[in-house]
Image (cartoon, grey):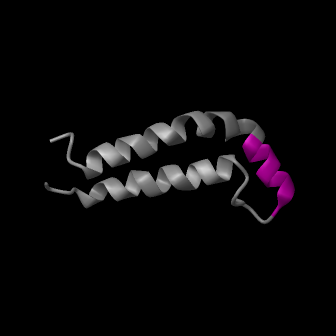
Amino acid sequence: MQFDFTGLIPIAGGIYALLAAFRVIRLSKNPADNELWLQKFGLMMKLISPLVILFGIAEFFGLFG
C-alpha cells in the first residue's frame, strides 16, 4: 500500500477549522472578533470541515490516483 503524505495537509486544515467552529480553539485574542467569525462562518465550517477531512484521508490512502 502506497501512502500519499500530501493528504495530511487537508486533514490538518479540516481538523483546525472544525476545532475553531466548535470554539475549542480561538482564532483571535479578541473575543468579539471570534464571535463575529463564528456567526459568519461557523455553520459553514461545521458542514465543510468533515468533508475536507474525508478528502484528506482519501488522498492519504491514494484513492485519487
Q: Residue drawn at (36%, 47%), measured in percent from left and top?
A: 56
Q: Is residue 11 magenta?
A: no
Quadrant containing the C terminus is top left
Q: What kind of secondary structure does the magenta stretch mostly adopt? A: helix
Which residue shows up at 67% across the image and 46% down it?
A: 21
Residue 22 in picture, x, y percent from top left = 70, 48
In the image, 29 versus 5, the foreground residue is 5
Provide residue 49's location: percent of width, then percent of height: 53, 42
In the image: residue 3, left or right of residue 55? left
Range drawn in magenta: 30-38
Residue at far front of view: 1
Residue 11 x, y percent position in the rendering: 42, 53
Residue that appears at 62% across and 34% down: 44
Residue ranking furthest to the right: 32
Describe residue 21's horizontal placement relative to residue 39 as left or right: left
> Outermost residue, bottom direction?
29
- Tell me which residue sits at (57%, 33%) in the image: 47
Image location (x, y in percent) of residue 18: 59, 48
Residue 34 located left or right of residue 13: right
Left or right side of 26 for 31: right
Between residue 61 and residue 47, name the one nearer to us: 61
Residue 12 vertical placement versus 42 (above, below): below
Q: Is residue 54 above or below residue 32?
A: above
